[in-house]
Amino acid sequence: MRITGGTEPLDASSVHPERYAVVTKMAKDLGVTRKALVGDGSLAGKIDTQKYVDAGAGLGLPTLTDIVSELKKPGRDPRAEFVDVGFDANITELSHVKPGQVLNGIVTNVAAFGAFVDIGVHQDGLVHVSELAHRFVKDASEVVKVGDRVKVKVLQVDEVRKRIGLSIKAMQPHAAAPAAPQAMGRFNAPRFSGR
């Protein structure tokens, strides 16, 4: 919980109240107030975190690094930036999905037999292990992992059983088959004179 506009500047940050004392010590060592320290990246950058490590108080380097990061940019969101998958806005129901469509998706689950992909409808589609790549794949985890953004082609839709068959390999260029070795013809050994 963060409290903005209060008398305590750290209340608007994600620094836990148990750690206010160490921030007070950091500010004092820099010759500034806590209020001046919060949000001033250049001041916070001068803090030597090693100096405040205290195993007895549960203050390790990772915790102190997080505190200094929060002092530099209070209220930051620690989650990774969200990147839109790019679902087709016209395809929101299973009935909208048709064989042959090319859709953006995100891998939601991986099993040995294939990968489940969210394509923006209320039913994930399955990319069978045989549809992952133009090569033999023993286990789907060799090719994809949860969270991967993929482009898929719809192979089949079974509305009754609520199943969608998808292919990733259909969206990849097919590697050219290796050229067949050329016939060498009959080998003619050099003839040696009997000298």
Image (cartoon, grey):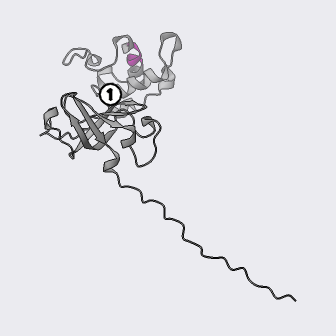
Quarter of the image where one finds residue 30: top left
Seen in the image, is 194 located left or right of residue 42?
A: right
Quarter of the image where one finds residue 152: top left
Q: Residue at x 37, y 28 (%)?
A: 69
Magenta run includes residue 24: yes
Q: Tell me residue 58's x, y (percent).
A: 48, 13
Q: Which residue is mark 1?
A: 78
Rendered position, 120 above or below 74: below
Residue sitting farthest toward the front? 186
> Identity of the amino acid at label 1?
Pro
Q: Residue at x 32, y 20 (%)?
A: 34
- Tell me the quarter of the image containing the C terminus: bottom right
Q: Tell me residue 135's x, y (percent).
A: 44, 48
Q: For numbered disc 1, what is the local secondary structure?
A: loop
Q: Tell me residue 117's x, y (percent).
A: 29, 34
Q: Residue at x 22, y 16 (%)?
A: 3
Seen in the image, is 19 located left or right of residue 158?
A: right
Task: Give the total number of marks visible in the rendering.
Answer: 1
What residue range appears in magenta? Answer: 21-25
- Tell me the quarter of the image containing the N terminus: top left
Q: Main secondary structure of the magenta part?
A: helix
Magenta run includes residue 192: no
Q: Residue at x 34, y 33 (%)?
A: 41
**Between residues 149 and 43, which one lies in front from this camera angle?**
149
**Between residues 13 and 6, which one lies in front from this camera angle?**
13
Quarter of the image where one finds residue 146: top left
**Between residues 6 and 32, which one lies in front from this camera angle?**
6
Q: Tell me residue 179's x, y (percent).
A: 49, 64
Seen in the image, is 10 located left or right of residue 87?
A: right
**Between residues 48 and 154, which one lies in front from this camera angle?**
154
Rendered position, 12 above or below 142: above
Q: Residues within 10 Å of mark 1 (few under 14, many from 20)?
A: few
